[in-house]
Amino acid sequence: MIKELPISIVVTSIGEDILLENLKNLTSNYPKINEILVIIPEEFKQSKFNDFDNVKYYFTKFKGQVIQRIYGFKKAKNNYILQLDCDCFISNLDIEKMHSLLINLSENNSAIAPVYYCDKSNKSIHEFTIGFWSNVKNILTYFICGSKYSIFKMGTVSCIGTNYGVDPKFMFNDIFISEWLPGGCVMHYKKNLILNNYYPFKGKAYSEDLIHSYLLKNNKIQLLITKKSKCYTEQPFVPKEFSEFRNFLKVQKYYWKLRNNKSFIKFYIWRILNYLRFIVQR
């Protein structure tokens, strides 16, 4: 008898080519996932999507990563829900490890995520480096952003809303308590899900994971990262056009206000520095 995990995976997509590749990965590996829900706006509906016995397709009249995901959350039938971006690849065995860790915790008020690796270089996406320029950057972020110094800022969000990932080589335990979780791959208890649309913007969902993490923490949900599970994806998105950069800053300002931060001057100093770096790198 095939082992089946009592997990619903919610995948948001606009029908990208990579979606099929990811679905093949999820449906061809062991153990079997009980339910995979793919949420796609009607405007991207193709004449035929590939059939898999544990995959359900839903076509919505609206478009937006967050609201599509919430729609999938509401349709999911299992008590354990994995939100997954269609460009994030994780093995079923690594999903099982996350599930086992989650159910073995003494309290069911946690969400858990894997560590992230670049699919091309096989290096940690949130790699921390040591050296002269790293120390210069650490000093700048310490004084301007209010960040912790060096590896101590792993998994933290500074007073002006800058966030730092977790490098597994500096994790001294299998589980790390974080202040935020990247939104590409997170497992929840169904009862802990946020089911209202918390993202008041159209277009690409910049920093939605920071907003989501903040709301989960407000609901007393502990955010965990495990190095037992790996997720492979592309390097994080960096705005390349001015319109993208402007929209990114708009969301960052919203998040900063949401957290009731007071560091007004530091917020704008850091954003100006980011803008100058954006201009230089164009």
Image: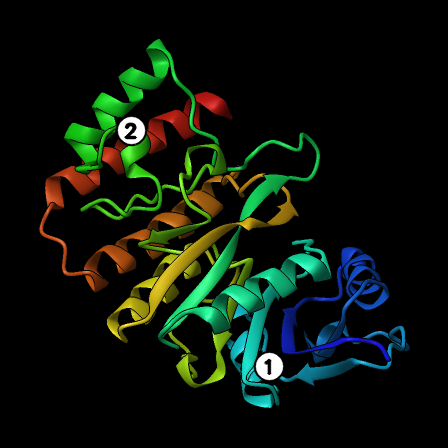
**Residue 1 vertical position relative to residue 92 in the rendered view, above or below:** below
Residue most extreme to the top: 132
Residue most extreme to the left: 262
Point out residue 137 in the picture as x, y percentages from the top left corner.
Answer: 30, 22
Label 1 environment density (alpha carbons within 10 Å; few <14, some 14–19, many ≥20): many
Which one is in front in this view, the residue at disc 2 or the one at disc 1?
1
- The residue nearer to you, when weighing 206 against 89, is 89
Q: Residue at x 43, y 83 (%)?
A: 195
Q: Residue at x 63, y 69 (%)?
A: 12
Q: Residue at x 34, y 54 (%)?
A: 177
Q: Which residue is mark 2?
A: 273
Point out residue 277 in the picture as x, y percentages from the top left corner.
Answer: 38, 25
Under circle 2, the secondary element is helix
Label 2 environment density (alpha carbons within 10 Å; few <14, some 14–19, many ≥20): few
- The residue nearer to you, when weighing 131 against 275, is 131
**Residue 162 vertical position relative to residue 75 in the rendered view, above or below:** above
Q: Which residue is mark 1?
A: 72
Image quadrant assignment for residue 220: bottom left
Q: Residue at x 40, y 80 (%)?
A: 192
Mark seen at residue 172: none
- The residue nearer to you, when weighing 140 against 118, is 118
Point out residue 248 in the picture as x, y percentages from the top left corner.
Answer: 40, 49
